[in-house]
Amino acid sequence: MPRKADEYAVYLFLSSGHREEVRFSQIQEFQKWYSGELVPKFDSEEFINVPIKNIQGEYMVVRPASIMAIRVEPVFFGSVERE
């Protein structure tokens, strides 16, 4: 039986060499943001909002054209920490 992830860590790799991490509680939230905000403006130099739901009072904006890669990693909370 497959486990269900508790949240998803999404890593945005930027053309500047920086990596930013945002977390989504469900994969559908990421897919909605990705297909609704990022894909239509993939080559734009205008800023778009990146949702940061886990950190109160903070926000991030990014230029879609500067995103070189995206990595989505499921995060499982449990009693055993592995490294």
Image (cartoon, rainbow, N blue to C red):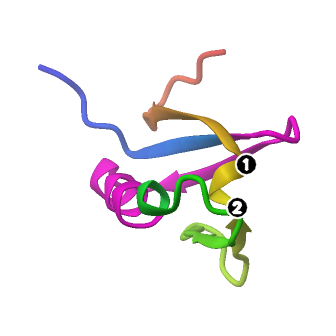
Number of residues whose C-alpha sits closer than 10 Å to that of mark 1, classed few (under 14), some (14–19) or many (20 or more): some
Relative depth, front residue between 48 and 57: 48
Classify residue 66 as left or right of residue 80: right
Task: Name the residue at 68% across, 71% down.
Answer: 46
Classify residue 55 as left or right of residue 19: left
Please tell me in which quadrant of the rendered image residue 25 appears.
Answer: bottom left
Task: Name the residue at 43% across, 54% down.
Answer: 39
Magenta span has 34? yes
Please provide percent x and percent y for residue 14.
Answer: 76, 42
Mark 2 and 1 residues: CB-CB less than 8 Å, in contact? Answer: yes
Task: Name the residue at 62% across, 40% down.
Answer: 11
Residue at disc 1, secondary structure: helix
Q: Quadrant of the N terminus?
A: top left
- At label 1, the amino acid type is Ser
Against 62, residue 12 (above or below) is above
Task: State the extent of the magenta-drawn residues as a range.
Answer: 13-37
Relative depth, front residue between 12 and 67: 67
Please provide percent x and percent y for residue 37.
Answer: 45, 66
Counting the numbered discs, the total is: 2
Marks 2 and 1, Cα distance to the nearest angstrom?
6 Å
Residue at disc 2, secondary structure: loop
Q: Which mark is residue 66?
A: 1
Task: Name the residue at 55% across, 43% down.
Answer: 10
Q: Which residue is mark 2?
A: 63
Relative depth, front residue between 10 and 75: 10
Classify residue 45 as left or right of residue 18: left
Number of residues whose C-alpha sits closer than 10 Å to that of mark 2, classed few (under 14), some (14–19) or many (20 or more): some
Magenta span has 58? no
- At label 2, the amino acid type is Arg
